Structure formats: C-alpha cells, structure tokens
Amino acid sequence: MKLIIRDDDTNYFTQPQDIQTAYSEIPTFPVSFAVVPMVVDVIGGCPETKGNETPRWVGDNEELSSYLRERVHNNNCDILLHGIYHQYKFPKGIKTPEMAWREKETEDLVDVIGQYKRKMEQLFDIIINCFVAPSNRILKRGIQAVYLNGMNYSGIIPISFDRDITLRSIKNYLYRWTLRARTGLPYPGLLDYGTHFELNACNQTSFDYLRKMFHYCEKIDAPMAINVHYWHIRDNKEHYKGFFDFIKYAIDKGAEPAMMREVFTANKE
C-alpha cells in the first residue's frame, strides 16, 4: 500500500531548515510539497507570510529552490501546484479562499494556472501533474482549468456538487458520501472523472484515526495520503506525535513511502 505525505504551503518565505526540522524524525521519507508560486499573506496559515502584501515568487528564494531541485533529482520529493497567490479575500466579510474567489473573476483560469505550472516546472525541473487548492476548496471553473492543463487534483468532492455533471462525477459523488455515512471516513482511493483523477489527503493526525484509515485502505487496496503543513509541525512538534508514530507503524506494517505523482502515473498507464 502506498503511503503519501502531502505537505502544503511551501513558499518564498520557507527555508530548507524549516522542512528539515519538521521532518527530522523521518528524514528520508519522500514528501509531496504543494508549493505556492506567488505567495501573499496566508491568513491563518504560514506565519512567515503575515502582513506580506506583495506577491513573492518562490524562485526568488534561491536556497529553497536549490534544496527542492536536489530533492527532486534524488527522487525524494514531488512538487504540486498550490494555487497561485494562496490569497484570501473577504466579500461581505466572509473569508474566501483563492480558488473560490477566482471562480467569479473574468480572468482566463486555464491560462493563469497553465502559466504558473510551466514556470514551476522550469524552476524545479519536474513535470507537475497535481494541483492542490488553498483550503482544499475549488469550484467548477477551477477544476476545468486543472485538467485542461494536464493535472490531477488532490482533494475530494464536497457536499456541494462542484464538478462537471457527468455519469462518472455523479457516481463518484454518491460513492464518496455513501462511504462517509457508513464508515465516517472520506474516501481515500482514486476517483476517476475521465478528464482527471482525484485523490484525497486526510487532515487528521491522531494515531488512532490514521490507523483506522490505514487498515481500511489495506482492505480496499487504496493508497493513503495525509495532509500536513511543515510550518505547523515545526512549531507544534508534540501535537504531531501521533502522526510520526503512525508513519513508523505503517512502514513496519509494509506500507510503501510514495509520492503523489506515482499514484496518478501508475493509474494513467
């Protein structure tokens, strides 16, 4: 069974030491980093971005770029596209994540996402095949822009039906929510939409929850992805004891450390 760590929010302000500190207990585990190309103030997120109003290109942090390129070269990390600015807006006082407010803009989302996908591919010398929406929220135009740029999506269809209406999407929706009602778990396996695949990453880090998810994934022969944030691990190590204990437990039980791209590529073939 493939075990994936999806780490969100790597950006211009991230330092290699931040990542090394976060993963000091499992330094060789390959991590799938969801990287923000042009970060602004990630409200309620990465503390180093607080108050930053000028978009900062991740490539201008040469130390971080070199570090991630080396890990890519050594097959020790994946690079995912994590929005564009990771910017929140507040229409009518409601905190709204990037891929929700961009849905109502007049810009060509296919072009914008494609532009930064190509820039990131050139910077990190890797083909990016996965998109992660800030706050895990994306709507129909956003999903279309993702798959029209040849990417898959790490996330899961919510109770509101924000996908193209097709037989496959309806089947995925019913299957996902039936499973949730029966087991209390978000469906952990791949969902095939015809245009792209989607793979959820659970955001619970308690040992008992992750162990339950792990054995369910074993039962249905599904990969398991976990969503964390390096900056939160770095600053709250004790909170993540269950997470690190679980990673070691899963590996002892035969789980294979993997990257997000490996799951999508294997199923495409």
Image (cartoon, rainbow, N blue to C red):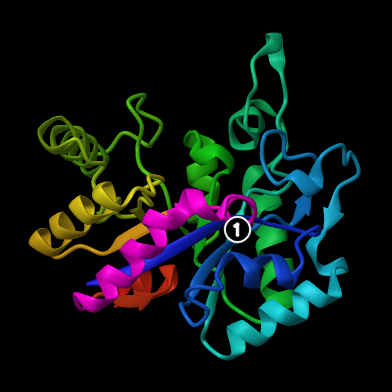
> Mark 1 falls on what kind of element?
helix
Q: What type of secondary structure mainly makes up the magenta span?
A: helix
Please report the residue visible at 31 percent of the width from the left and 33 percent of the height from the top. 165
Horizontal and vertical percent position of residue 173: 24, 35
On the picture, is 82 further left or further right than 259? Answer: right
Question: Residue at point 80% right, 59% down?
Answer: 12
The one nearer the camera, 9 or 57, is: 9
Q: Residue at x 13, y 64 (%)?
A: 218
Place of residue 254 in the rendered image (x, y in percent of width and height, measured from the top left): 20, 78
Q: Position of residue 263 (x, y in %)?
A: 33, 70
Residue at 64% x, 25% y: name it: 104
In the picture, residue 204 is in which quadrant? top left
Left or right of 52? Residue 115 is left
Q: Amino acid at mark 1?
A: Tyr
The stretch drawn in magenta includes residue 249: yes
Can residue 94 be seen here? The reply is yes
- The range drawn in magenta is 227-254
Whether residue 240 is in magenta: the answer is: yes
Quadrant of image for the N terminus? bottom left
Q: Position of residue 217 (x, y in %)?
A: 18, 59
Q: Residues within 10 Å of mark 1 (few under 14, many from 20)?
A: many
**Residue 196 can be seen in this image:** no
Q: Is residue 235 above or below residue 123?
A: above
* Quadrant placement of the C terminus: bottom left
Name the residue beneath numbered marker 1.
230
